[in-house]
Amino acid sequence: IEGISHIAQGLRRETCIITVLLLGSCGLDDVAARTLAAAVPHSQGLSEVHLPCNLISDAGCDALLDACGGVENPFAALDMEGNPLTTVCFTKVAKACALRELGNVGNKESVRSSYGVETTAAEEEKHAAAADNEEDDLSDYSDTGFSI
C-alpha cells in the first residue's frame, strides 16, 4: 500500500503529466482503491485508470467510479476487469465507459470541487475552450441516432 500512497501523492502534484494509470495484477484491494480515488480528482490530465485483475471489490470500485465522475458523467475511463465485482457494480462501470465513449464526458471540475480542489482562472478558461471544441466535434455525430 505504501507504493499506492506514493502514486497518489504524485497524482496530486500540479506538475503530474500522467494521463493513463495502469496497475494490473498488483494485488490492490479496497484500501488501495480508496487511496487512489482520493487522488484522482486532483490529477490534471488523468483520463484512464486501468486496474485489471486486482482484489478490488464493489466498495473500492464505487469510490473509484465516483472519483472518475460517476456513472452518468465520467471524465476518466475506468477498467476493473478481473476484479471480484458483483454484476451490479460491473454494469455501472460498463455503463460509464460506454457513455464516455459516446462522448458523454463529465465535468471534471465539478468532481474536483467536491473533493475540495480549487481551480485557477487559467484552468477554467482552458477547460471551457476544450468543452467548446468537444461540442463542435460531437455535432458531427448528430445524425447517428444517438442523443448526445
Image (tube, helix red, strand yellow):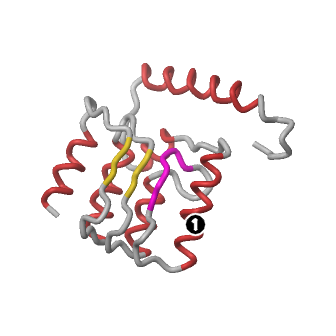
Quarter of the image that includes the C terminus: top right
Residue 82, quarter of picture: bottom left
Q: Which residue is mark 1?
A: 92
Give x and y (percent) for residue 123.
43, 25
Label 1, secondary structure: give it: helix
Residue depicted at 64% across the width and 29% down the height: 134
Circle 1: residue type: Lys
Depicted 103 relative to depicted 89: above or below: above
Percent coordinates x, y for residue 5 in the rendering? 18, 55
Viewer-proximal residue among 23 and 1: 23
| Quarter holding residue 55 | bottom left
Identify the image quadrant of the N terminus: bottom left
Q: Is residue 77 magenta?
A: yes
* Residue positioned 52% across, 73% down in the render: 89
Relative to 126, residue 28 above or below: below
Taking the image as shown, residue 102 lies to the left or right of residue 139, namely left
Q: How many marks?
A: 1
Q: Position of residue 130 (x, y in %)?
A: 56, 25
Q: Residue at x 71, y 24 (%)?
A: 136
Along the viewing direction, whichever of 68 and 91 lies nearer the viewer:
91
In this rendering, position of residue 104 left or right of residue 74: right
Range of magenta residues? 74-79
Residue 90's x, y, as percent?
53, 71
Whether residue 145 appears in magenta in the rendering, the answer is: no
